[in-house]
Image (cartoon, coloured by chain):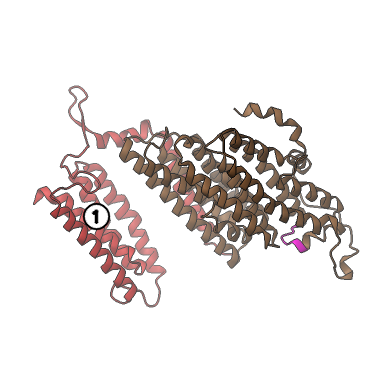
Chain colours: A red, B brown
Amino acid sequence: MMVYIVSILSIIFVVGFVGFSSKPSPIYGGVGLFASGGVGCGIVVSFNGSFLGLMVFLIYLGGMLVVFGYTTAMATEQYPEAWVSNMVVLGSFVVGLLMEFLLVLYVLVGEELKVVFEFNEIGDWAIYDTGDSGVFTKESMGVAALYSYGNWLVVVTGWSLLIGVVIILEITRGN
Amino acid sequence: MNPLTLSLVLTTMISGTLIVMTSSHWFMIWVGFEMNMLAIIPLLTKEHNPRSTEAATKYFLTQATASMLLMMAAITNLLYTGHWSIMKLINPTASIMMTMALTMKLGLSPFHFWVPEVTQGIPLMSGLILLTWQKLAPLSVLYMIMPLINMNILLIMSLMSIAIGGWGGLNQTQLRKIMAYSSIAHMGWMLAVLTYNPTMTLLNLYLYIPMTVTTFMLLMINSTTTTTSLSHTYNKLPLITTLILITMLSLGGLPPLTGFLPKWAIIQEMTKNSSIIMPTLMALLALLNLYFYTRITYTTSLTMFPTANNMKIKWQFKNSKQTMSLPLMITISTLTLPLAPMMMILD
Protein backbone atom coordinates (compact mmCIF):
# COMPACT_ATOMS: atom_id res chain seq x y z
CA MET A 1 0.00 0.00 0.00
CA MET A 2 2.91 2.28 0.68
CA VAL A 3 3.83 1.97 -2.97
CA TYR A 4 0.62 3.70 -3.95
CA ILE A 5 0.80 6.42 -1.31
CA VAL A 6 1.45 9.12 -3.90
CA SER A 7 -1.54 8.07 -6.01
CA ILE A 8 -3.87 8.04 -3.02
CA LEU A 9 -2.65 11.42 -1.83
CA SER A 10 -3.06 12.81 -5.34
CA ILE A 11 -6.64 11.58 -5.48
CA ILE A 12 -7.45 13.28 -2.18
CA PHE A 13 -5.65 16.38 -3.53
CA VAL A 14 -7.94 16.51 -6.55
CA VAL A 15 -11.06 15.83 -4.48
CA GLY A 16 -10.14 18.77 -2.24
CA PHE A 17 -9.76 20.97 -5.33
CA VAL A 18 -13.13 19.84 -6.65
CA GLY A 19 -14.54 20.68 -3.23
CA PHE A 20 -13.74 24.35 -3.50
CA SER A 21 -14.02 24.66 -7.27
CA SER A 22 -17.71 23.86 -7.03
CA LYS A 23 -17.95 27.27 -5.40
CA PRO A 24 -19.45 26.97 -1.98
CA SER A 25 -19.06 29.92 0.37
CA PRO A 26 -15.45 30.88 1.13
CA ILE A 27 -15.53 29.38 4.62
CA TYR A 28 -16.31 25.96 3.24
CA GLY A 29 -13.89 26.54 0.40
CA GLY A 30 -11.21 27.06 3.03
CA VAL A 31 -11.83 23.49 4.20
CA GLY A 32 -10.99 22.25 0.73
CA LEU A 33 -7.87 24.43 0.66
CA PHE A 34 -6.72 23.06 4.00
CA ALA A 35 -7.25 19.47 2.93
CA SER A 36 -5.54 19.93 -0.41
CA GLY A 37 -2.68 21.87 1.13
CA GLY A 38 -2.07 19.29 3.78
CA VAL A 39 -2.17 16.40 1.36
CA GLY A 40 0.04 18.31 -1.06
CA CYS A 41 2.62 18.58 1.69
CA GLY A 42 2.34 14.83 2.08
CA ILE A 43 3.09 14.32 -1.61
CA VAL A 44 6.13 16.60 -1.45
CA VAL A 45 7.41 14.86 1.67
CA SER A 46 7.01 11.43 0.13
CA PHE A 47 9.33 12.58 -2.64
CA ASN A 48 12.07 13.28 -0.06
CA GLY A 49 11.31 16.97 0.09
CA SER A 50 10.91 17.16 3.84
CA PHE A 51 12.03 20.76 4.27
CA LEU A 52 9.74 22.14 1.57
CA GLY A 53 6.77 20.14 2.85
CA LEU A 54 7.23 21.54 6.33
CA MET A 55 7.60 25.03 4.89
CA VAL A 56 4.27 24.74 3.08
CA PHE A 57 2.58 23.42 6.22
CA LEU A 58 3.93 26.19 8.42
CA ILE A 59 3.76 29.21 6.18
CA TYR A 60 0.96 28.44 3.75
CA LEU A 61 -1.42 26.48 5.97
CA GLY A 62 -0.43 27.91 9.29
CA GLY A 63 0.03 31.50 8.23
CA MET A 64 -1.76 32.46 5.05
CA LEU A 65 -4.75 30.13 5.27
CA VAL A 66 -5.34 31.02 8.92
CA VAL A 67 -5.47 34.70 7.98
CA PHE A 68 -7.77 33.77 5.10
CA GLY A 69 -10.04 31.95 7.54
CA TYR A 70 -10.19 34.96 9.84
CA THR A 71 -11.03 37.38 7.02
CA THR A 72 -13.75 35.17 5.58
CA ALA A 73 -15.19 34.77 9.06
CA MET A 74 -15.33 38.56 9.29
CA ALA A 75 -16.88 38.95 5.85
CA THR A 76 -19.34 36.11 6.05
CA GLU A 77 -22.78 36.28 4.52
CA GLN A 78 -26.10 35.63 6.12
CA TYR A 79 -26.85 32.30 4.44
CA PRO A 80 -23.58 30.69 3.41
CA GLU A 81 -23.77 28.02 0.73
CA ALA A 82 -22.50 24.60 1.69
CA TRP A 83 -22.13 21.69 -0.70
CA VAL A 84 -25.59 20.32 0.03
CA SER A 85 -27.55 23.53 0.28
CA ASN A 86 -27.47 24.53 -3.37
CA MET A 87 -28.21 22.26 -6.29
CA VAL A 88 -25.59 23.95 -8.48
CA VAL A 89 -22.80 23.44 -5.99
CA LEU A 90 -23.81 19.87 -5.33
CA GLY A 91 -24.08 19.18 -9.05
CA SER A 92 -20.63 20.51 -9.88
CA PHE A 93 -19.13 18.67 -6.92
CA VAL A 94 -20.69 15.42 -8.08
CA VAL A 95 -19.52 15.96 -11.66
CA GLY A 96 -15.98 16.66 -10.44
CA LEU A 97 -16.00 13.52 -8.29
CA LEU A 98 -17.28 11.51 -11.22
CA MET A 99 -14.48 12.77 -13.46
CA GLU A 100 -11.89 11.86 -10.83
CA PHE A 101 -13.46 8.42 -10.35
CA LEU A 102 -13.32 7.77 -14.10
CA LEU A 103 -9.70 8.87 -14.22
CA VAL A 104 -8.80 6.54 -11.35
CA LEU A 105 -10.55 3.67 -13.12
CA TYR A 106 -8.64 4.47 -16.32
CA VAL A 107 -5.35 4.43 -14.46
CA LEU A 108 -6.14 1.17 -12.67
CA VAL A 109 -7.48 -0.66 -15.68
CA GLY A 110 -4.79 0.61 -18.01
CA GLU A 111 -2.13 -1.08 -15.87
CA GLU A 112 0.20 1.85 -15.92
CA LEU A 113 0.78 4.66 -13.48
CA LYS A 114 1.59 7.38 -15.93
CA VAL A 115 -1.11 10.04 -16.21
CA VAL A 116 0.82 13.29 -16.33
CA PHE A 117 4.12 12.11 -15.01
CA GLU A 118 5.58 8.89 -13.64
CA PHE A 119 4.73 8.07 -10.04
CA ASN A 120 8.16 6.88 -9.04
CA GLU A 121 9.27 6.69 -5.48
CA ILE A 122 12.41 8.78 -5.73
CA GLY A 123 11.21 10.75 -8.69
CA ASP A 124 13.72 13.20 -9.95
CA TRP A 125 14.89 14.62 -6.68
CA ALA A 126 18.31 13.43 -7.69
CA ILE A 127 21.12 13.41 -5.19
CA TYR A 128 24.13 15.62 -5.55
CA ASP A 129 27.29 14.02 -4.32
CA THR A 130 29.64 16.86 -3.52
CA GLY A 131 32.71 15.03 -2.35
CA ASP A 132 32.69 13.62 1.15
CA SER A 133 30.64 16.15 3.06
CA GLY A 134 27.62 13.86 3.02
CA VAL A 135 24.56 13.75 0.84
CA PHE A 136 22.83 16.94 -0.32
CA THR A 137 19.39 16.52 -1.78
CA LYS A 138 18.22 18.69 -4.67
CA GLU A 139 15.48 20.12 -2.53
CA SER A 140 17.50 21.83 0.15
CA MET A 141 20.06 22.79 -2.45
CA GLY A 142 17.24 24.42 -4.36
CA VAL A 143 16.26 26.48 -1.35
CA ALA A 144 19.87 27.49 -0.84
CA ALA A 145 20.18 28.39 -4.51
CA LEU A 146 17.15 30.63 -4.20
CA TYR A 147 19.12 32.92 -1.95
CA SER A 148 22.39 32.78 -3.90
CA TYR A 149 21.75 32.48 -7.63
CA GLY A 150 18.12 33.40 -7.32
CA ASN A 151 18.62 36.85 -5.79
CA TRP A 152 16.52 38.52 -8.43
CA LEU A 153 13.65 36.08 -7.98
CA VAL A 154 13.51 36.78 -4.25
CA VAL A 155 13.49 40.53 -4.89
CA VAL A 156 10.77 40.29 -7.52
CA THR A 157 8.51 37.95 -5.56
CA GLY A 158 8.95 39.98 -2.38
CA TRP A 159 8.09 43.17 -4.23
CA SER A 160 5.08 41.53 -5.89
CA LEU A 161 3.69 40.34 -2.57
CA LEU A 162 4.11 43.79 -1.03
CA ILE A 163 2.53 45.47 -4.04
CA GLY A 164 -0.29 42.93 -3.99
CA VAL A 165 -1.24 43.99 -0.50
CA VAL A 166 -0.88 47.70 -1.33
CA ILE A 167 -3.04 47.37 -4.43
CA ILE A 168 -5.76 45.39 -2.69
CA LEU A 169 -5.89 47.98 0.06
CA GLU A 170 -6.04 50.75 -2.53
CA ILE A 171 -8.87 49.10 -4.47
CA THR A 172 -11.01 48.26 -1.47
CA ARG A 173 -10.40 51.62 0.14
CA GLY A 174 -13.61 52.90 -1.42
CA ASN A 175 -13.79 56.63 -1.55
CA MET B 1 -4.74 59.24 -5.75
CA ASN B 2 -2.29 59.28 -2.87
CA PRO B 3 1.12 60.26 -4.37
CA LEU B 4 2.96 57.44 -2.60
CA THR B 5 0.50 54.84 -3.84
CA LEU B 6 0.55 56.31 -7.31
CA SER B 7 4.33 56.18 -7.50
CA LEU B 8 4.41 52.60 -6.18
CA VAL B 9 1.78 51.53 -8.69
CA LEU B 10 3.49 53.21 -11.63
CA THR B 11 6.87 51.78 -10.61
CA THR B 12 5.42 48.29 -10.44
CA MET B 13 3.66 48.68 -13.76
CA ILE B 14 6.81 49.85 -15.50
CA SER B 15 9.03 47.25 -13.86
CA GLY B 16 6.53 44.51 -14.70
CA THR B 17 6.82 45.31 -18.38
CA LEU B 18 10.60 45.62 -18.12
CA ILE B 19 10.81 42.23 -16.41
CA VAL B 20 8.79 40.70 -19.25
CA MET B 21 10.99 42.31 -21.87
CA THR B 22 14.33 41.36 -20.30
CA SER B 23 13.77 37.88 -18.86
CA SER B 24 15.04 34.63 -20.26
CA HIS B 25 12.99 32.33 -18.03
CA TRP B 26 9.32 31.72 -18.76
CA PHE B 27 8.43 31.92 -15.07
CA MET B 28 9.84 35.43 -14.77
CA ILE B 29 7.86 36.48 -17.82
CA TRP B 30 4.69 35.23 -16.16
CA VAL B 31 5.63 37.09 -12.96
CA GLY B 32 6.18 40.26 -14.99
CA PHE B 33 2.77 39.96 -16.65
CA GLU B 34 1.06 39.43 -13.32
CA MET B 35 2.86 42.41 -11.74
CA ASN B 36 1.85 44.56 -14.69
CA MET B 37 -1.79 43.52 -14.50
CA LEU B 38 -2.10 43.89 -10.73
CA ALA B 39 -0.48 47.30 -10.78
CA ILE B 40 -2.75 48.79 -13.40
CA ILE B 41 -6.00 47.82 -11.64
CA PRO B 42 -5.93 50.82 -9.23
CA LEU B 43 -5.27 53.09 -12.20
CA LEU B 44 -8.40 51.78 -13.86
CA THR B 45 -10.51 52.44 -10.77
CA LYS B 46 -9.06 55.89 -10.14
CA GLU B 47 -12.54 57.40 -10.19
CA HIS B 48 -14.59 55.25 -7.90
CA ASN B 49 -17.84 54.57 -9.74
CA PRO B 50 -19.53 51.28 -10.67
CA ARG B 51 -18.64 51.65 -14.34
CA SER B 52 -14.91 51.72 -13.62
CA THR B 53 -15.24 48.80 -11.22
CA GLU B 54 -16.93 46.84 -13.99
CA ALA B 55 -14.18 47.82 -16.43
CA ALA B 56 -11.44 46.81 -13.98
CA THR B 57 -13.15 43.48 -13.31
CA LYS B 58 -13.44 42.68 -17.01
CA TYR B 59 -9.80 43.62 -17.55
CA PHE B 60 -8.66 41.50 -14.61
CA LEU B 61 -10.64 38.44 -15.68
CA THR B 62 -9.40 38.40 -19.26
CA GLN B 63 -5.79 39.15 -18.40
CA ALA B 64 -5.70 36.59 -15.60
CA THR B 65 -7.06 33.93 -17.95
CA ALA B 66 -4.45 34.88 -20.51
CA SER B 67 -1.68 34.65 -17.90
CA MET B 68 -2.85 31.22 -16.88
CA LEU B 69 -2.81 30.10 -20.51
CA LEU B 70 0.69 31.50 -20.82
CA MET B 71 1.85 29.52 -17.79
CA MET B 72 0.21 26.40 -19.20
CA ALA B 73 2.02 26.89 -22.50
CA ALA B 74 5.34 27.36 -20.69
CA ILE B 75 4.77 24.19 -18.67
CA THR B 76 3.83 22.24 -21.79
CA ASN B 77 7.05 23.46 -23.33
CA LEU B 78 8.87 22.30 -20.19
CA LEU B 79 7.23 18.89 -20.49
CA TYR B 80 8.41 18.37 -24.05
CA THR B 81 11.80 20.10 -24.04
CA GLY B 82 12.84 20.01 -20.40
CA HIS B 83 13.92 23.59 -20.02
CA TRP B 84 12.41 26.92 -19.15
CA SER B 85 14.41 29.18 -21.41
CA ILE B 86 12.85 31.26 -24.11
CA MET B 87 14.58 29.88 -27.11
CA LYS B 88 11.65 28.80 -29.21
CA LEU B 89 8.46 26.96 -28.43
CA ILE B 90 9.25 23.76 -30.26
CA ASN B 91 6.02 21.97 -29.46
CA PRO B 92 3.02 23.08 -31.55
CA THR B 93 0.66 22.75 -28.60
CA ALA B 94 2.77 25.08 -26.52
CA SER B 95 3.22 27.47 -29.43
CA ILE B 96 -0.48 27.74 -30.23
CA MET B 97 -1.43 28.11 -26.58
CA MET B 98 1.17 30.83 -26.12
CA THR B 99 -0.09 32.66 -29.21
CA MET B 100 -3.66 32.49 -27.88
CA ALA B 101 -2.56 33.79 -24.48
CA LEU B 102 -0.61 36.72 -25.91
CA THR B 103 -3.30 37.72 -28.39
CA MET B 104 -5.79 37.62 -25.55
CA LYS B 105 -3.60 40.09 -23.71
CA LEU B 106 -3.35 42.33 -26.75
CA GLY B 107 -7.04 42.39 -27.47
CA LEU B 108 -6.93 40.74 -30.84
CA SER B 109 -9.96 39.14 -32.41
CA PRO B 110 -11.64 36.81 -31.32
CA PHE B 111 -10.55 37.97 -27.87
CA HIS B 112 -11.28 41.63 -28.52
CA PHE B 113 -14.55 41.97 -26.62
CA TRP B 114 -12.99 43.44 -23.50
CA VAL B 115 -11.16 46.31 -25.20
CA PRO B 116 -14.04 48.73 -25.95
CA GLU B 117 -15.81 48.00 -22.69
CA VAL B 118 -12.73 48.49 -20.54
CA THR B 119 -11.55 51.59 -22.43
CA GLN B 120 -14.98 53.18 -22.12
CA GLY B 121 -15.24 52.77 -18.36
CA ILE B 122 -11.95 54.34 -17.34
CA PRO B 123 -10.57 57.91 -17.33
CA LEU B 124 -8.76 59.16 -20.43
CA MET B 125 -5.28 58.93 -18.90
CA SER B 126 -5.81 55.35 -17.81
CA GLY B 127 -7.18 54.56 -21.25
CA LEU B 128 -4.02 55.98 -22.75
CA ILE B 129 -1.81 53.77 -20.58
CA LEU B 130 -4.01 50.76 -21.32
CA LEU B 131 -3.83 51.16 -25.08
CA THR B 132 -0.14 51.98 -25.37
CA TRP B 133 2.03 50.76 -22.51
CA GLN B 134 0.16 47.50 -22.01
CA LYS B 135 0.82 46.46 -25.60
CA LEU B 136 4.59 46.52 -25.17
CA ALA B 137 4.98 43.42 -23.03
CA PRO B 138 2.92 40.93 -25.07
CA LEU B 139 4.39 42.17 -28.33
CA SER B 140 7.93 41.71 -27.03
CA VAL B 141 7.18 38.08 -26.12
CA LEU B 142 5.53 37.52 -29.52
CA TYR B 143 8.62 38.98 -31.18
CA MET B 144 10.80 36.53 -29.24
CA ILE B 145 8.79 33.41 -30.13
CA MET B 146 8.18 34.54 -33.70
CA PRO B 147 9.90 31.72 -35.66
CA LEU B 148 7.51 28.98 -34.62
CA ILE B 149 4.18 30.75 -34.39
CA ASN B 150 1.57 29.06 -36.53
CA MET B 151 1.22 31.52 -39.40
CA ASN B 152 -2.32 30.56 -40.37
CA ILE B 153 -3.76 31.20 -36.93
CA LEU B 154 -2.04 34.55 -36.66
CA LEU B 155 -3.12 35.69 -40.12
CA ILE B 156 -6.74 34.67 -39.52
CA MET B 157 -6.79 36.49 -36.21
CA SER B 158 -5.19 39.59 -37.70
CA LEU B 159 -7.62 39.76 -40.60
CA MET B 160 -10.57 39.33 -38.26
CA SER B 161 -9.17 42.05 -36.01
CA ILE B 162 -8.78 44.53 -38.83
CA ALA B 163 -12.33 43.76 -39.97
CA ILE B 164 -13.79 44.01 -36.49
CA GLY B 165 -11.76 47.10 -35.65
CA GLY B 166 -13.15 48.74 -38.78
CA TRP B 167 -16.77 47.69 -38.61
CA GLY B 168 -17.00 47.92 -34.82
CA GLY B 169 -15.82 51.51 -34.74
CA LEU B 170 -18.29 52.64 -37.39
CA ASN B 171 -21.26 52.79 -35.05
CA GLN B 172 -19.54 54.61 -32.21
CA THR B 173 -19.79 58.20 -31.07
CA GLN B 174 -17.89 57.73 -27.83
CA LEU B 175 -14.29 58.63 -28.50
CA ARG B 176 -12.79 56.12 -26.10
CA LYS B 177 -14.58 53.26 -27.82
CA ILE B 178 -13.42 54.59 -31.18
CA MET B 179 -9.85 54.56 -29.93
CA ALA B 180 -10.34 51.03 -28.60
CA TYR B 181 -11.51 49.76 -31.99
CA SER B 182 -8.64 51.64 -33.59
CA SER B 183 -6.27 49.81 -31.27
CA ILE B 184 -7.80 46.45 -32.23
CA ALA B 185 -7.31 47.21 -35.92
CA HIS B 186 -3.73 48.40 -35.47
CA MET B 187 -2.86 45.29 -33.48
CA GLY B 188 -4.23 43.30 -36.38
CA TRP B 189 -1.90 45.11 -38.78
CA MET B 190 1.05 44.58 -36.44
CA LEU B 191 0.57 40.86 -36.04
CA ALA B 192 -0.20 40.18 -39.69
CA VAL B 193 3.39 40.84 -40.68
CA LEU B 194 4.97 39.25 -37.59
CA THR B 195 5.69 35.93 -39.25
CA TYR B 196 7.02 37.60 -42.40
CA ASN B 197 9.27 40.34 -41.07
CA PRO B 198 8.95 41.23 -37.38
CA THR B 199 10.86 44.47 -37.90
CA MET B 200 7.74 45.91 -39.54
CA THR B 201 5.75 44.91 -36.47
CA LEU B 202 8.12 46.98 -34.38
CA LEU B 203 7.93 49.85 -36.85
CA ASN B 204 4.15 49.85 -36.65
CA LEU B 205 4.34 49.75 -32.87
CA TYR B 206 6.84 52.62 -32.70
CA LEU B 207 4.57 54.79 -34.83
CA TYR B 208 1.23 53.65 -33.41
CA ILE B 209 2.20 54.61 -29.86
CA PRO B 210 3.03 58.28 -30.62
CA MET B 211 -0.10 58.62 -32.75
CA THR B 212 -2.32 57.23 -30.01
CA VAL B 213 -0.58 59.30 -27.33
CA THR B 214 -1.11 62.41 -29.44
CA THR B 215 -4.79 61.65 -29.94
CA PHE B 216 -5.38 61.03 -26.27
CA MET B 217 -3.51 64.16 -25.26
CA LEU B 218 -5.58 66.24 -27.66
CA LEU B 219 -8.70 64.72 -26.13
CA MET B 220 -7.43 65.33 -22.60
CA ILE B 221 -6.99 69.06 -23.17
CA ASN B 222 -10.72 69.56 -23.20
CA SER B 223 -11.58 66.28 -21.44
CA THR B 224 -13.77 65.39 -24.37
CA THR B 225 -15.05 61.86 -24.53
CA THR B 226 -17.88 62.17 -27.03
CA THR B 227 -17.91 63.27 -30.63
CA THR B 228 -20.46 65.93 -29.75
CA SER B 229 -18.25 67.66 -27.23
CA LEU B 230 -15.33 67.33 -29.62
CA SER B 231 -17.36 69.21 -32.19
CA HIS B 232 -17.51 72.17 -29.81
CA THR B 233 -13.75 72.70 -29.73
CA TYR B 234 -13.84 75.23 -32.54
CA ASN B 235 -15.10 77.61 -29.93
CA LYS B 236 -12.70 76.78 -27.14
CA LEU B 237 -9.36 76.08 -28.77
CA PRO B 238 -9.61 76.45 -32.54
CA LEU B 239 -6.08 75.22 -33.10
CA ILE B 240 -7.02 71.82 -31.68
CA THR B 241 -9.43 71.28 -34.54
CA THR B 242 -6.63 71.46 -37.10
CA LEU B 243 -4.40 69.22 -35.02
CA ILE B 244 -7.16 66.65 -34.65
CA LEU B 245 -7.65 66.77 -38.39
CA ILE B 246 -4.08 65.85 -39.21
CA THR B 247 -3.71 63.36 -36.35
CA MET B 248 -6.85 61.48 -37.29
CA LEU B 249 -5.85 61.33 -40.93
CA SER B 250 -2.44 60.07 -39.89
CA LEU B 251 -4.05 57.33 -37.80
CA GLY B 252 -6.10 56.38 -40.83
CA GLY B 253 -2.99 55.92 -42.91
CA LEU B 254 -3.13 58.65 -45.51
CA PRO B 255 0.01 59.14 -47.60
CA PRO B 256 1.75 62.35 -46.86
CA LEU B 257 1.45 61.68 -43.12
CA THR B 258 3.36 59.33 -40.84
CA GLY B 259 0.58 56.79 -40.45
CA PHE B 260 1.06 55.75 -44.04
CA LEU B 261 4.57 54.44 -43.37
CA PRO B 262 3.72 51.33 -41.34
CA LYS B 263 0.95 50.28 -43.70
CA TRP B 264 3.17 50.77 -46.71
CA ALA B 265 6.02 48.81 -45.13
CA ILE B 266 3.69 45.98 -44.07
CA ILE B 267 2.10 45.67 -47.50
CA GLN B 268 5.54 45.74 -49.10
CA GLU B 269 6.87 42.97 -46.85
CA MET B 270 3.84 40.80 -47.43
CA THR B 271 3.93 41.18 -51.20
CA LYS B 272 7.65 40.40 -51.19
CA ASN B 273 6.64 37.05 -49.70
CA SER B 274 4.17 36.40 -52.54
CA SER B 275 1.11 37.03 -50.44
CA ILE B 276 -1.29 39.16 -52.49
CA ILE B 277 -4.83 38.49 -51.30
CA MET B 278 -4.09 39.11 -47.65
CA PRO B 279 -2.60 42.63 -47.95
CA THR B 280 -5.33 43.57 -50.42
CA LEU B 281 -8.00 42.55 -47.94
CA MET B 282 -6.18 44.34 -45.13
CA ALA B 283 -5.90 47.55 -47.13
CA LEU B 284 -9.56 47.42 -48.12
CA LEU B 285 -10.65 46.87 -44.54
CA ALA B 286 -8.47 49.74 -43.36
CA LEU B 287 -10.78 51.99 -45.32
CA LEU B 288 -13.45 51.37 -42.71
CA ASN B 289 -11.07 52.73 -40.10
CA LEU B 290 -10.41 55.75 -42.28
CA TYR B 291 -14.11 56.39 -42.55
CA PHE B 292 -14.73 56.91 -38.86
CA TYR B 293 -11.56 58.95 -38.43
CA THR B 294 -12.73 61.17 -41.27
CA ARG B 295 -16.11 61.43 -39.60
CA ILE B 296 -14.43 62.75 -36.45
CA THR B 297 -12.50 65.34 -38.45
CA TYR B 298 -15.70 66.24 -40.29
CA THR B 299 -17.54 66.99 -37.07
CA THR B 300 -14.57 68.72 -35.49
CA SER B 301 -12.83 70.85 -38.02
CA LEU B 302 -14.81 70.86 -41.22
CA THR B 303 -18.28 71.75 -39.99
CA MET B 304 -19.86 73.65 -37.14
CA PHE B 305 -22.37 71.38 -35.48
CA PRO B 306 -25.70 72.84 -34.40
CA THR B 307 -25.48 73.93 -30.77
CA ALA B 308 -27.50 75.96 -28.35
CA ASN B 309 -26.91 79.68 -28.56
CA ASN B 310 -24.98 79.91 -25.34
CA MET B 311 -22.35 77.57 -26.71
CA LYS B 312 -21.66 79.63 -29.77
CA ILE B 313 -19.77 82.37 -27.98
CA LYS B 314 -17.78 81.33 -24.95
CA TRP B 315 -15.47 82.92 -22.45
CA GLN B 316 -11.97 82.23 -23.69
CA PHE B 317 -10.22 81.01 -20.57
CA LYS B 318 -6.49 80.50 -20.45
CA ASN B 319 -5.72 76.82 -20.82
CA SER B 320 -4.53 75.42 -17.51
CA LYS B 321 -4.15 71.78 -18.49
CA GLN B 322 -0.64 70.44 -18.68
CA THR B 323 0.12 69.38 -22.22
CA MET B 324 3.43 67.64 -21.94
CA SER B 325 5.37 67.73 -25.17
CA LEU B 326 2.23 67.86 -27.23
CA PRO B 327 3.81 69.82 -30.12
CA LEU B 328 6.60 67.26 -30.30
CA MET B 329 4.18 64.36 -30.36
CA ILE B 330 2.10 65.99 -33.06
CA THR B 331 5.16 66.49 -35.20
CA ILE B 332 6.26 62.90 -34.73
CA SER B 333 2.87 61.49 -35.49
CA THR B 334 2.21 63.45 -38.64
CA LEU B 335 5.34 64.67 -40.33
CA THR B 336 7.94 61.92 -40.18
CA LEU B 337 7.16 60.16 -43.46
CA PRO B 338 10.23 61.66 -45.18
CA LEU B 339 12.34 59.83 -42.58
CA ALA B 340 11.25 56.50 -44.05
CA PRO B 341 14.74 55.54 -45.36
CA MET B 342 15.91 55.59 -41.75
CA MET B 343 13.84 52.46 -41.24
CA MET B 344 16.91 50.37 -41.83
CA ILE B 345 18.18 51.17 -38.36
CA LEU B 346 15.45 48.95 -36.98
CA ASP B 347 17.10 45.78 -38.27
Chain letter, disc 1 residue? A
Local packing at callout 1 (Cα closer than 10 Å; few below 14, some 14-19, many 20+) is some
Q: Is residue B144 above or below residue A118?
A: above
Asked if residue A43 is among those painted magenta in the image, a careful observer would answer no
Q: Position of residue B65 (x, y in %)?
A: 44, 54
- Please identify the quarter of the rendering in which residue B291 is found: bottom right
Amino acid of disc 1:
Gly
Q: Nearer the viewer, residue B62 or A109?
A: A109
The quarter in which the C terminus of chain B is drawn is top right
Q: Is residue B184 visible?
A: no
Q: Nearer the viewer, residue B36 or A94?
A: A94
In this image, A61 relative to B263: left or right?
left
Instruction: Identify the residue at the far right of this view.
Output: B313
Q: Position of residue B323 (x, y in %)?
A: 76, 47
Total marks shown come to: 1
Q: Main secondary structure of the magenta part?
A: loop
Which residue sits at x=20%, y=60%?
A102
Q: Which residues are magenta?
A: B223-228
- Please identify the quarter of the rendering in which residue B253 is found: top right
Q: Secondary structure beneath disc 1?
A: helix
- Please identify the quarter of the rendering in which residue A50 is found: top left
Q: Position of residue A1 (x, y in %)?
A: 8, 52
Q: Is residue B263 above or below residue B339?
A: below
In this image, B238 relative to A113: left or right?
right
Q: Position of residue B252 (x, y in %)?
A: 71, 48
Location of mark 1 (residue) = A38
